Image (spheres, rainbow, N blue to C red):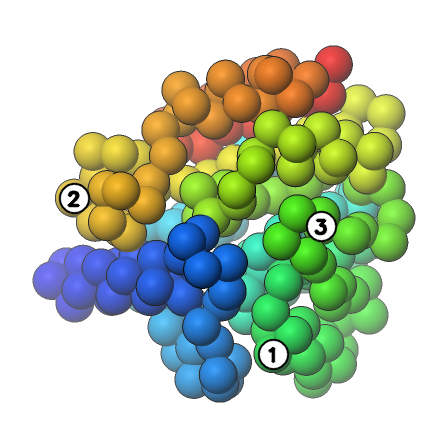
């Protein structure tokens, strides 16, 4: 348990440093090296990726955008669990986008596409059924305008899922880098989304699902 906690603290610290909203840059020089942190198997114990994806209740042919995909922790799992669907793994860091494309090719995941995003626009190449944000929303400046823009990339009835560290969690990024679930609800509400589900099975993070109104 101590080892898992240390990895979680390390992950939170590196995310906060690498994606600090104050400088609008990811600090990734070597995606392969960062994959050792983000894709560490010990993360599964607290991130519960399989349970998260199952809770999304996606149809088999769903088109899903993993925004802020990093090294593909969720993207690869989504692609494997949705062999008839499509996964757009989007990131603002070119190093990560190249890593994602190479990983999709290496793992023979033809339904996984790497996408180069901008800080203020996901730049998705097609409309999606779901946009997933894991430990990403608190790095987005101008969230209301960002999500208003994202609505045009959602299919009719499209959803947005947000997983992020709770303000009172003992692990994760520094408190100043976190955003409360109440704040997320207000901002997405102002952007035209309604809360449709809320899950509490993650030990360190909240899990909110919104639907475009």
Residue picked out by circle 1: 95
What distance separates the C-alpha of mark 1 from that of mark 2? Answer: 31 Å
| Residue closest to the eye, 182 or 44 | 182
In the image: residue 141, left or right of residue 47: right
Residue placed at 47% from the left, 48% from the top? 139
Residue placed at 75% from the left, 63% from the top? 115
Point out the residue furthest to the front here: 23
Residue picked out by circle 3: 122
Q: Residue 48, image x and y in percent?
A: 41, 48
| Residue closest to the eye, 100 or 109 | 100
SS class, disc 2 = loop
In the image: residue 72, left or right of residue 148: left
Q: Looking at the picture, does residue 91 appear above or below residue 53?
A: below
Task: Assess whether mark 2 and mark 1 are in contact (beta carbons under 8 angstroms).
Answer: no
First-in-chain label (1 vs 3)? 1
Residue picked out by circle 2: 170
Residue 79, disc: none
- Where residue 38 sits, quadrant-wise, is bottom left
């Amino acid at each position: 348990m101590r080892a898992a906690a240390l990895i979680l603290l390390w992950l939170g610290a590196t995310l906060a440093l690498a994606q600090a909203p104050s400088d609008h840059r990811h600090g990734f020089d070597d995606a392969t090296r960062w994959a050792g942190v983000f894709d560490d198997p010990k993360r599964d114990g607290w991130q519960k990726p399989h349970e998260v994806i199952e809770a999304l209740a996606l149809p088999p042919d769903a088109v899903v955008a993993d925004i802020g995909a990093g090294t593909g922790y969720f993207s690869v799992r989504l692609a494997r669990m949705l062999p008839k669907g499509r996964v757009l793994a989007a990131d603002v860091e070119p190093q990560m986008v190249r890593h994602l494309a190479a990983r999709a090719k290496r793992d023979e995941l033809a339904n996984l596409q790497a996408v180069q995003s901008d800080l203020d626009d996901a730049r998705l190449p097609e409309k999606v059924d779901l946009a997933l944000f894991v430990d990403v929303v608190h790095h987005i400046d101008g969230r209301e305008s960002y999500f208003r823009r994202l609505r045009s990339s959602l299919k009719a009835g499209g959803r947005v899922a947000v997983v992020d560290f709770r303000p009172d969690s003992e692990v994760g990024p520094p408190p100043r880098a976190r955003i409360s679930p109440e704040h997320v609800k207000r901002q997405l509400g102002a952007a035209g989304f309604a809360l449709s589900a809320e899950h509490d099975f993650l030990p360190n993070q909240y899990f909110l699902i919104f639907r475009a109104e």
